Image (cartoon, rainbow, N blue to C red):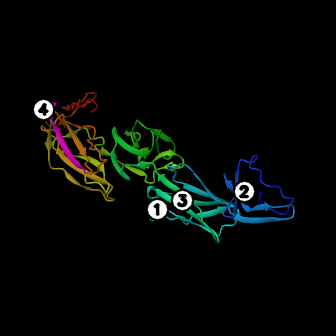
Amino acid sequence: SWYLNYADSSSVAIDAATDDNYAIVTDTSVVNGLFKTTITISNINVDLAGTYKAVFWFSDTESYTSEGELTSRQVTITPSDAIVTSSSNAQFQMTCTISSSDTTTGVTWTGPSGVDVSGTSIDGDDYILTLTEPTSTASGAYTCAFAFSAGTAPSGVFSDININLVTSTSPSSVYTTAGGAELTLTCTLDSTSEETLYLWDGTSDLDADTTDYVDPTTTATFILDVTDDDAATIASNTYLCRKSATEYSVDSVDVTVLQASDDFGTVTSGIEGDIQTLTCSADYDAAVALPTIEWKLQASDESTFSVISGAVEGLNDDGSQFISALNVTVGDATDGNQYKCDVVYSTGLSASVDFTSDVTTVSLTQMSVDGDDYQISAVGTASIVFTCIAASSDSSI
């Protein structure tokens, strides 16, 4: 008879017919002086661990015994999938749970080369490894190896851990221009199927304009319309690609919006011979090449503009703006003509947008006094009339 943790003759023998965990085969023939019985134990767990004793009964008072110790040590892992994928930036946890009939003396964690595996904790029989703020370099195989005072030391193996974070493929600093420019930002995520990605602007998630999946990568494209009204808001935001609140890109995108403006003010007319100064200004950033400002004068056919030179250019006192000032003399050559400045940014960055300012014009007209000099005297109720005639296309004069 076979017994588990035999105490005395009153102990109940194992009945393989009623217990699926056991199979007993006894060879009742004696071969070379050996009488053999074999017990096979399946579904081993801590409840089946202990001392197994075979008792050979020859009579009620004569028996012989043979015994052996079965120690159960099992490790289960969480997550248990053969291939595990995570997009979480917050943390990623692996748990090895030890179930043993004796006490472990410790556990050793190993992982890919260069990965810090010191973030361990113990909760009862659960031995936990936490990767804090993991990156794709943490992908690979991990092992938890338990130690015991003697015998075989079991291990848990996470064979294929994939840390696939959401990625921003746009530069960390992007330069664009106002006035209707389009700014394109791109987010990607390696995944087994198409995922929904968003662009976080610091307040809300923006939906993608397009999403494409080419195994194994989801690519989402976001187009921002940089209007004059939205320029300040876009420039104040920091953009993140993300899948959820805990799944986002490590790198953010800061947008600098460069704007150009005219400072023509109220200059619309002048006396013949006067010098009028027309000024254009453009935002300047040290990371961007100086813009080009080109002055143009409307041709007599009023349909084309010709380039004119002579402007004085330079940065303002705090270096935030590039200024171009053009002096024009009021006279026949400028009478009724239109001037404009074109501002072109060419940053040389992959995300740059060339920009030409809206056409801003100013009318310069000639004014003179009609007639000769007069010395007039009048007596009584006589009226003296003075008349000024302005040759001008400006009806507000």
Q: Distance between the residues labelled 3 and 2?
A: 36 Å
SS of the residue under disc 2:
helix
Name the quadrant containing residue 152: bottom right
Residue 13 to residue 385: above or below = below
Label 2 neighbour load within 10 Å: few <14, some 14-19, many 20+? some
Label 4 neighbour load within 10 Å: few <14, some 14-19, many 20+? few
* Residue 231 in picture, x, y percent from top left: 39, 43
The quarter of the picture where the C terminus appears is: top left
In the rendered structure, which segment of residues is drawn in magenta? 291-304
Question: Which residue is rendered at x = 25% and y = 28% of the image?
Answer: 383
Lateral position of residue 367 relative to residue 74, left or right: left
Q: Residue reaching furthest bottom?
A: 149
Q: Mark 4 points at which residue?
A: 300
Question: Which residue is rendered at x = 19% and y = 44% of the image?
Answer: 295
Give whichever of 224, 373 is nearer the camera: 224
Q: Mark 1 points at which residue?
A: 112
Q: Residue 48 carries which label?
A: 2
Labels 4, 2: front one? 2
Question: Which residue is rendered at x = 13% and y = 30% of the image?
Answer: 301
Identify the amino acid type marked 2: Leu
Q: Name the residue under label 3.
A: 131
